[in-house]
Image (spheres, helix red, strand yellow):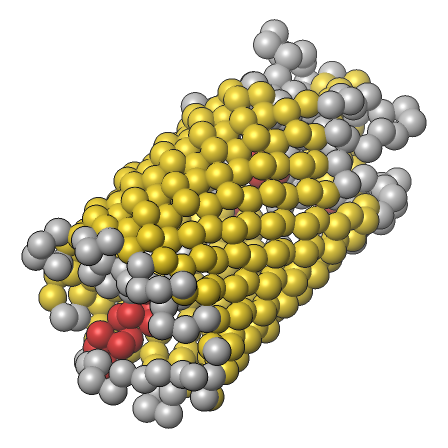
Amino acid sequence: MSKKNNGISPALAALTTAAMALPGISPTVQAAVAANEPKLSLQYTRYDEDSIPSDDADPNTGDRDRYEIDVLQVQFLYPFSDKWQITGGVVYDDMSGSSPWYVRPTDTVNATGDPLVVMSGATIDDTRYDYSVGAQYFGEKYTISPSIGYSTEKDYTAVSGSLEVEYEFPNKATSISGGIAVSFDEIDPTQEAGVVRVNNEDKENYSLFGTINQVINKYTIIQSTLGVSIYDGFLSDPYKQAWVAGAVLPDSRPDDRTQYTWATRLRRYSELFGAALHIDYRFYYDDWDVRSHTLDLGLHKVTDSGWAFDSSIRYYTQTQADFYEPFYAQVRADGEYSSDYRLSPYGSISFRLGLSETIGDWTVRLGAERYISDKSYSVQSVDVENPALLDFTQFTFGMDYSF
C-alpha cells in the first residue's frame, strides 16, 4: 500500500527527490529511518559504444565495432521494523564487441606519424553476475549500514564488503558519516595463441571516506566528501598491449595505486523555475599523476501531476598517467607501458535526460545519456590524442513497486 505525505513543501519535495536521484546523497541530513513498506526495483540498460572511425584504426585491425552491453538489475528493500531493514540486488551484464588492443604509429619503421588503434579482432562475448546484500540499523541519532558483495564473470571474481556509519547532530541540520570498503579480486585471463598473458593474478582494494551534510536553509542543502582508495596487486590489463620500439609487449603498470577524491554537492530550490538546481564538483588525484576535474550541472523538476523531469550536463577533464604514451619509440628503464585511453589526457561532455512518474504503488523511470570525449575538451593542451577515446549512448528503463 502506498503512502503519501501531503504536508511537505514544494521546495523540500524537489530537494528531496533531486538528492535521492544521486548515489551517495541523503535526501535530508536528518537521521535516516526505515522504509514504511517493501520495495522491488527492476531496471534495464542498453549501452552502445560508437565504432572506431576508419581513419583512426589499423587497416588490418578487422572489426571496429566496440562493446554493446545489456544490463538487467533487480533490487529489493524489506523493512523488518522501524529499526531494521535489509537490501539486496542482482546485476546481470551481457556484453559483446571488440576492444582496443594497442596503438601503433603510422610509420612503424621510424616510430613516427599519427597513432592507429589495433582492435582485439575476434568479438568478445562475456556475461557478469553481481550479487549484493546489506542491512541498515536505525538508532535515535545514528545509522549503521553493513553490506557484502560477490561478482563473477568468465575470467574474474571479486568479493567485497563495506561498513558505513551516519550520525545526526542535535540541531537536526547537520550530519556526518564515514565508511570503509574492501575488495579482493582475482583474474584468470583467457589465453590466446601467440599472445603473452599472465595465468592468474589478484589485487586488493581498501577505501575510506568521510562526509558532512548541512542544511543551509529550507531551500539549500550541501554535502562534502573526502575519500582515499588504496590498490595493491595486479593492476595491469591482461587484454591490452603496448607498441614499444617496434615490439608489442604486454600492458605493464605499477602494482600499487593510491587515489584521493574530494567531492562537493549543492542542491538549491529555485522558486523562479519551481525546480531544484544541482551543482556537483569532484577533484581526483592519484600517485600515477592522474588528476581530474568533474563538474555536473542539472535541473530537477516535479510537476503538480507527479511527473519528475531531470536534465543535466557533465564536463570531465583529466591529465595522463606518468608512464602513459600512445606508443613508445624507446624502451623505458622501469618497464612500465600502457596505451590505455583511460590513462590518456582528454576531456569529455555528457548530456542526460530523465523522466519518471508515480502511479499508485508503481513508479516508472526512463533515461537517456550521450557521452562524447575528445582531446579538444581537455583543459590542458594535448599534442597527440589517443585514437581509442570513447563515445557512447545509453538508454534505461526502470520500474519500482511498493508493496
Q: Position of residue 366 (x, y in %)?
A: 54, 76
In depth, the one of 275 and 2 nearer the eye is 2
Q: Residue furthest left?
A: 171
In the image, what residue occupies the spot 78% across and 48% down? 126
Q: Can residue 110 be seen in this view?
A: no
**Quick one: which residue is furthest to the top in this view?**
333
Residue drawn where x is 43% and y is 40% of the image: 162
Q: Furthest-right residue in view?
A: 193
**Placement of 337 over or under 347, stated as above or below:** above
Question: Which residue shows up at 55% across the image and 44% down it?
Answer: 149
Q: In which quarter of the image is residue 170?
A: bottom left
Tell which residue pokes out farthest to the bottom in this image.
Answer: 305
- Give the left or right position of residue 123, taking residue 235 as reference: right
Task: Measuring from the top left, give residue 327's x and y in whole percent.
Answer: 67, 26
Residue 228, by quadrant, is top left
- Please, is residue 288 above or below residue 114 in the view? above
Q: In this view, does 206 lie above or below 353?
A: above
Determine which quarter of the picture holds residue 27: bottom left
Q: Position of residue 385 (x, y in %)?
A: 59, 39
The residue nearer to you, when weighing 398 against 123, is 398
Residue in the picture at 61% in, 62% down: 73
If the image is split into quadrants, where does the N terminus sit?
bottom left
